[in-house]
Amino acid sequence: MEVSREVMKIPDDFDSEIALHMYKTAVTIRKFETKVYEIFNLNFIPGTMHLYRGEEAIATGVCANLTDTDYITSTHRGHGHCIAKGADIKKMMAELFGRRNGYCKGKGGSMHIADFTIGMLGANGVVGGGIPIATGAALSCKLKAQMEGLNRMNVCACFFGDGASNQGANFHEALNMAAIWDLPAIFVLENNLYAMGTAIKRTCKLENLSDKAKAYGMPGITVDGNDVVAVYLETRDAVERARHGEGPSLLECKTYRHYGHSKYDPAKYRPEEEKDEWVNNRDPITRFTQQLVEFGIDEGELTNIDAQVDSEIDDAVEFAKAGEMPKPENLLEDLYTEGT
Amino acid sequence: MAEERIITYRDALNEALREEMRRDPTIILLGEDIGKYWNGAFKVTGGLADEFGEERVRDTPISENAIVGCGVGLALTGFRPVCEIMFGDLITLAMDQIVNQAAKSRFMFGGQSSVPLIVRTPFGAGGSYAGHHSSSYEAWFMHVPGLRIAVPSTPYDAKGLLKTALRMKDPVMFFEQKFLYNSKGHVPEEEYTVPFGKADVKRQGDDVTIVATSKMVLTALEAAQALEKDGISVEVVDPRTLNPLDEDTIVKSVQKTSRLVVVHESADRGGISGEIIKVAIKGAFYYLDAPPVTVAGKNCHLAFAPVLEQFGSPSVNDIIDAVKGIV
């Protein structure tokens, strides 16, 4: 499919509470990433960063279908997944600052944020590295349901990019395994058209990467990944199938990142007109705002959410700045659960 | 005293899995051909699918990376997976999940999680299996912080260490020399475990310490017996686990004998002997009467023709020569 400028209309019977929750999520991701981008240069944040700005609709629409007992696995571009799954942006920001009050006490940074209390099994620095782990988490959901005699399972949503879908050991093995065992997994392929600087057209002959699902005998769907509503509704179907033992799905979400691959990438390999089209005509936040207004949400309500998120982001930065720096010897902690 | 119960190394491992699976419903086995149709390439999982069902003893596709990766996902979410990699050489196909995921998760996440995962693998030379089915790669994992490593040499240790591994919270690499599976030894009927990080002195001696691992413990004991006839008293120390490594027992033995030979099957260069000799030098430098030596695999791959394969791995005579060279 070609992603057009058209977006989905929010169905009349859509739960407005979910709609507003998704708006807050998407805006929080947008403002979090924008803030992080701005403060890069203030030397608070070591290392590099892969920002999710532009792709907010996917994490938002997918995770709005999940609860705290469902799992997700994430990628090197994981801030959006964390926020959408319900992570605390204060502890996220502190982790980016490398502080003791961050999620990983400064040991993981941007690429390894995790929150096991809400089923966020970790961002992952290895492209595709989280996919087999998601298969294992989905097997865990299935086995737990069996042990407890439940018909309805928790699920695992697995985020990864177009580049990862070319990975043999991680993508192929894990999707095949999830399919043969009918595991409750939703494989969310975020196709932002580029793996670092290499266009997906140069590394895969398929127009729609969801066609890869055929190889595993699972449903494969391509959706406009810049349309929160479309992502939410397609994921809802996939999650329902997964919860009821009907196995995994592959959901390709076509999208575009607003920034370069990482901190210092100006992304000159992307044509200006392409970038302009995606950033200015298909921006997921702008579109979702319009969708919500057409649905009948009061614009003032959205503005209030914006202001609330601004203040939460400011609080997160203050929390991070106030955080204690790790001591050198903290390095040697947390390696083993038992012993040294 | 009760009569000794003699069983094979294979059955000892099978008992460990069976007993712990009865005790702990979260133990899940994953691997190629480990279920009821084949019972494991080396039959270690024989009968387990019959007793515990195919949900807990899972035949997988030939997907080493996903076997371990699926194990990591299970381990992070409350289960205790045991992944079998059919041959130690094929562990290369699962290295990312072992090194980058299993070993690093807890650390990278600041201690939020544990990864109670076991990777079991038959390894080592002896059957003319050639280059892709004979290697010994345990040294690689000694270099990776976060992994525990077991290299049992006897049925007693195999069972006791596997039972301990099945109760630990961190990832364990469990190396089984495939030509030990039929070896026999005493394994008590009653419950016991063997701790990680505690070496076993398999033979007491005064003149030379041999530190040997896995099947090389048996080879070293044979050499020690032959050397006794020549009036050389050899102590054989079996570390049993490489991480944690029982440095204390190694150092004390070398302080007593003043001479050290390290024996392992894997290639000499960059092998575990370097680490063991480092421990001995740090702890017993002034006690040494001769430079420590190694008897290890050649710095070469294992080969097919029996004469070539045998030349590649340490023999009883190699050990005898090495000992005589420093006494």
Image (tube, grey):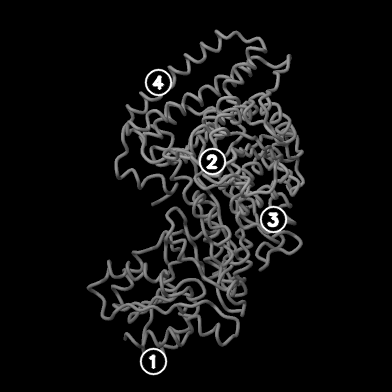
Residue at point 51%, 42% (across, down): A269
Residue under label 1, please give it.
B230
- Residue A169 in sight in this render: yes
- Kindly identify the amino acid type of the residue bearing the numbered disc 3: Thr
Measuring from the top left, give residue A281's x and y in whole percent.
Answer: 59, 24
Residue at 42% x, 70% y: name it. B271
Viewer-nearest of discs 4 and 3: 4
Q: Are marks 4 and 3 on the same chain?
A: no
A28 to the left or right of B280:
right
Q: Is residue A47 above or below residue B313?
A: above
Residue B41, image x, y percentages: 68, 67
**Measured Cα–Cα span from mark 1 to mark 2:** 63 Å
Q: Which residue is mark 2?
A: A75
Number of other residues with Cα within 10 Å of mark 1, as a class: few under 14, some 14 to 19, many 20 or more: few
In this rendering, the answer to whether A26 lies above or below B34 is above
Could you tell me how far apart the alpha carbons at marks 2 and 4 are, in whole angstroms?
A: 25 Å
- The type of residue carrying mark 4 is Asp
Q: Position of residue A85 (x, y in %)?
A: 56, 29
Residue at point 60%, 59% (across, down): B16
Q: Nearer the viewer, residue A178 or B151?
A: A178
Secondary structure state at the residue bearing disc 3: loop
Chain of the residue on which disc 1 is drawn = B
Name the one closer to the observer, A126 or A273. Answer: A273
Instruction: Say how many tags the image has.
Output: 4
Horizontal arrangement in the rendering, residue B299 relative to residue A211 (left or right): left
Amino acid type indicated by mark 1: Asp
The residue at 37%/32% (across/down) is A40
Q: Mark 3 — residue?
A: B60
Answer left or right for A28 relative to A247: left
